[in-house]
Amino acid sequence: MSEKTTIYDIAKELNITAATVSRALNNNPKISQSTRKLVLETANRMNYKQNRLALALRSGRSNNVGVIVPRINTNFFASVIRGIEEGLHPEGYQVIICQTHEEENREIENINTLLNAQVDGILMSISNLSEENNHYIERVIQKKIPLIFFDRKKEINNVSSVTIDDYQASYQTTEHLIAQGCDKIAYFSGDRSLEIYEERYRGYEQALLDNNIAINPDYIINIKSNVQEGQEAAEKLLALATPPNAIFSTSDFAALGAIQKLKEHGIKIPEDFCVFGFGNEPFTKFMELSISTVDQSPLEMGKVAAQVFLDKINNRDKKKTESQVVLMPKLLIRQSSTRIA
Amino acid sequence: MSEKTTIYDIAKELNITAATVSRALNNNPKISQSTRKLVLETANRMNYKQNRLALALRSGRSNNVGVIVPRINTNFFASVIRGIEEGLHPEGYQVIICQTHEEENREIENINTLLNAQVDGILMSISNLSEENNHYIERVIQKKIPLIFFDRKKEINNVSSVTIDDYQASYQTTEHLIAQGCDKIAYFSGDRSLEIYEERYRGYEQALLDNNIAINPDYIINIKSNVQEGQEAAEKLLALATPPNAIFSTSDFAALGAIQKLKEHGIKIPEDFCVFGFGNEPFTKFMELSISTVDQSPLEMGKVAAQVFLDKINNRDKKKTESQVVLMPKLLIRQSSTRIA
DNA sequence: TAGATTTGTGTAATCGATTGCATTCTTTTG
DNA sequence: CAAAAGAATGCAATCGATTACACAAATCTA
């Protein structure tokens, strides 16, 4: 009996209609004080809980928001999600999590699942959706479901985004390394078909050009974000005729791998060699040799993304609600790039 | 027009009934091949997507599962959630995330929210729900919604749990430290009103007793899981007349803080002093002096929790489906507790 | 070929909450 | 005091999908 109480149960109990119960529960002014009081008491006594599915079906709003990320168990994404959750929870939204594992088909599958689930919005960090599959994105837009990219975005009409200024982050980092006296700066790049990595590369390139340093293709290595690829890349660099004297890695993990290799080779950091990471993973701060890195303020990013979503939802009617928020990255200059001069 | 297609739209298009459309889409054998083909094609052409809310309302199953954790942005919880998601996603369930921030009222609020949302199950790592509020838990059980505790559990009838053997982990760690020649082992404890911390304490205590080492209350310090409290606790220990020669910290972060302090004092690790953490946070492996720690296999824990949920759902009728899974912890013995001896 | 099966669809109720439009009963107004 | 206004509630449709039951048409059986 205590399994499920509906407004009909309450209505029957009080010999009134479900409509009246509903109105009483929703503080409709056309209900008499006495009835309202009675309904509220009875609802409480019978342990009534509103069925949000029924409400959602009728109203067309599920109060669920989908979040799509490559994976949840990295500091960055976990923190963004935390930010999103903190921004949305007070407004009565629940967050549904989907992981893509950087696989395109999972990305498509997740979008479909979330549409099926009738989410009120989708916040996603896009991985590898190719041009030809853009129509999956278009479909979301057509259904007028707010779509917001964070961190990893794509230029698509009507899609808002929250990112950091990757170009600036990269430009400033490169200038910092130059200021430290490094003139041969290697660069660990991510997949440049993703905007964030293209932007970071541009920042690196431009800073070198602006400082009259030639670009050396040998110094530019594509890596995945893990320790081992950082080690391998460092090995390659050290085997060059003219090895670099700094590495700017767009991944903290790869930066760590590089540092390990450099140490193995007896290279002193930062005296002989500077290393700069990206992402402010917790470990970068904890190392005996703390690693300089770029903070992307993921918590903030999540909160802003949540806010952008709320703005869109509350301004559905008004046409122009697209917004591109760009957060400023923070350079955390630590031991791995601070020369005692 | 492309905004939302329902089975009624398809029915109208083909001059048939929604019932027929529904049956065709669900591969009901009573539908002729020709109609089925026609419906499938039309559904596809009109970009039909099943409304899971409607299905959920009718069937009473939302295919959503709620997960309640203290916070999402730590390696441990993020990994457990990942495991849960990977276990449940193939079965068609979505995961809804809630954070408690270790606050009791948020815990209660989250349970209510999830019940409102008609989740099919709740997986939670309980924080601070006091005895007097146990009825919120009871309510979930009464509604016959599978409830599964992971990591942090509470002894409550009809609630399954997935944990690691904290007692064993702690006992073995303590014995390991003793085997390394440490005879004055300090212990950083968490809140012992939580079962996991009580169990860990018991393991520590018993191992000392079994090895004829007296318990020294000065060596037992309550800490929160962060770097600073580890530093402070280490300071306290070093100020003792007879300082310890090992620390077993139930938090990796506190272990790190302690190590930093010990180094400041010129104490050599592991030669003069061994340190053992708990949790296998990523940084423990990356440090120049890698930190020994206990791996709780969070991914595995999440997957098992998902499996336990699925078993419960699929055996609703059978009475006895409660299960208490205990995973074996893995000691990761690294530099911080390995004497060259 | 009449009656029995089989096959394929339609009808209508259901899940739980909300809400526009009656309807009833009071109260007020001229 | 009759009529109009107001207050409180009931009726019934709706959101979208499923399904027990009914029914018609086609096929088969004896």
Image: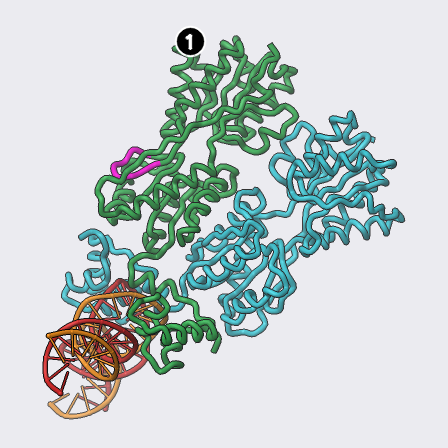
Chain colours: A green, B cyan, C orange, D red
Q: Is residue A155 within the magenta segment?
A: yes
Q: Is residue B235 within the magenta segment?
A: no
> In the rendering, at what x and y percent does residue A4 appear?
44, 73
Describe residue A282's horizontal placement relative to residue A103 as left or right.
Answer: right
Residue at horizontal 51%, vertical 47%? B82
Quarter of the view holding residue B319: bottom right
> In the rendering, at what x and y percent does residue B16 appear?
17, 67
Residue at horizontal 72%, vertical 54%? B198
- Which secondary structure dominates the residues rendered in magenta? loop
* Residue B70 drawn above or below residue B11: above
Describe residue B205's horizontal placement relative to residue A95 as left or right.
Answer: right
Q: Which residue has dot 1 on it?
A: A211
| Protein chain holding label 1 | A
Describe residue D18's horizontal placement relative to residue A177 as left or right.
Answer: left
Magenta segment, which residues? Answer: A154-161
Q: Is residue A96 visible?
A: no
Q: Quadrant of the C terminus of chain B?
A: top right
The answer to which of A104 and B250 lies nearer the viewer is B250
The answer to which of B19 and A203 lies nearer the viewer is A203
Q: Secondary structure beneath disc 1? A: loop
> In the rendering, at what x and y percent does residue B111 appear?
50, 60
The answer to which of B246 and B298 lies nearer the viewer is B246
> In the rendering, at what x and y percent does residue B34 appear?
20, 64
Task: Check disc 1 and give the amino acid type.
Answer: Asn
The answer to which of B304 and A312 lies nearer the viewer is A312
